[in-house]
Image (cartoon, rainbow, N blue to C red):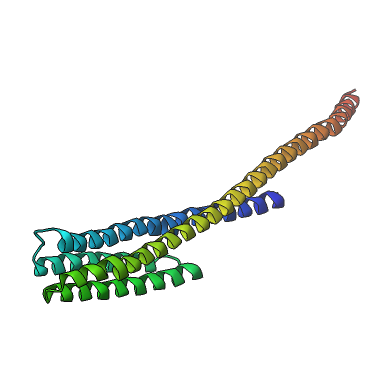
């Protein structure tokens, strides 16, 4: 019975561990992975918006362009804040810091390009966009890909832990069932033996009663 109780405690511990692993997969891996998708989408949105302004014959007004870029920046900052609230391993923290630095760097390049176009230096602005801006943009995407790879690796590790705990739970449950069956058989045997032992005593008592009556 003590073994069954200990098995029950260990089973509850394993179930709690599985619950924590599943919760971590959702909160600390799935949400960041989804956030990375939205970050990538906003970065491409910024890039395409500025590209259209520079290369289309009928560009947007500068105020409208700055407002749209500001909206993308607000979304990116909000998404980074969501990412930072999750549990981060050391490599994630480093990569996220690099990403924030790269985003700030790209914003400065955007401001430089807009200043050039406002001064009439459109060709210079296009050159900065195509070379320095493209390199900064690609570096930002590369860092996001690093973060995605980290999510995949850690998620795989969490799945291994969950499978290990589930296997332990199965073994403990099997042992508990086995012990319960053994205890049940022992109880039945003891009851049967008790009946066999008590039966002659009952017979002897009856014979004594008949003798006394005689």
- Horizontal side of 132 relative to 183 (left or right) equals left
Q: Quadrant of residue 32?
A: bottom left
- Percent x, y of residue 53: 15, 62
Residue drawn at (69%, 41%), measured in percent from left and top?
A: 180
Q: Is residue 97 above or below residue 209?
A: below
Quadrant that contains the C terminus: top right
- Percent x, y of residue 64: 10, 66
Q: Is residue 141 above or below residue 128?
A: above
Q: Residue furthest front?
A: 123
Nearest the eye: 178 or 190: 178
- Horizontal side of 214 relative to 33 (left or right) equals right
The reply to whether residue 87 is visible in this rendering is yes
- Percent x, y of residue 109: 26, 73
Residue drawn at (21%, 61%), measured in percent from left and top?
A: 51
- Horizontal side of 207 relative to 7 (left or right) equals right
Residue drawn at (36%, 63%), measured in percent from left and top?
A: 138
The reply to whether residue 12 is visible in this rendering is no
- Percent x, y of residue 47: 25, 62
Nearest the eye: 172 or 40: 40
Nearest the eye: 102 or 158: 102
Count of number-bearing discs: 0
Nearest the eye: 94 or 209: 94
């Amino acid at each position: 019975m003590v073994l069954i109780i200990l098995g029950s405690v260990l089973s509850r511990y394993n179930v709690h561990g599985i619950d924590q692993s599943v919760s971590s997969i959702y909160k600390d891996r799935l949400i960041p992975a989804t956030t990375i998708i939205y970050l990538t989408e906003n970065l491409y949105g910024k890039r395409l918006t500025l590209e259209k302004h520079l290369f289309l014959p009928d560009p947007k007004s500068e105020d409208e362009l700055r407002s749209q870029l500001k909206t993308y920046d607000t979304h990116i900052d909000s998404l980074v804040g969501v990412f930072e609230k999750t549990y981060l391993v050391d490599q994630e923290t480093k990569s996220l810091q690099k990403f924030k630095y790269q985003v700030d760097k790209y914003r400065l390049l955007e401001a430089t390009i807009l200043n050039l176009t406002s001064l009439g230096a459109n060709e210079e602005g296009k050159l900065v966009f195509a070379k320095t801006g493209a390199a900064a943009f690609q570096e930002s995407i590369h860092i996001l890909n690093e973060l995605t790879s980290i999510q995949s690796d850690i998620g795989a590790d969490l799945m291994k832990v969950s499978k290990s705990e589930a296997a332990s739970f199965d073994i403990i449950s099997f042992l508990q069932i086995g012990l319960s069956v053994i205890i049940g058989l022992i109880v039945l045997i003891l009851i049967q033996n008790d009946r066999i032992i008590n039966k002659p005593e009952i017979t002897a008592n009856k014979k004594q009663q008949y003798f006394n009556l005689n």
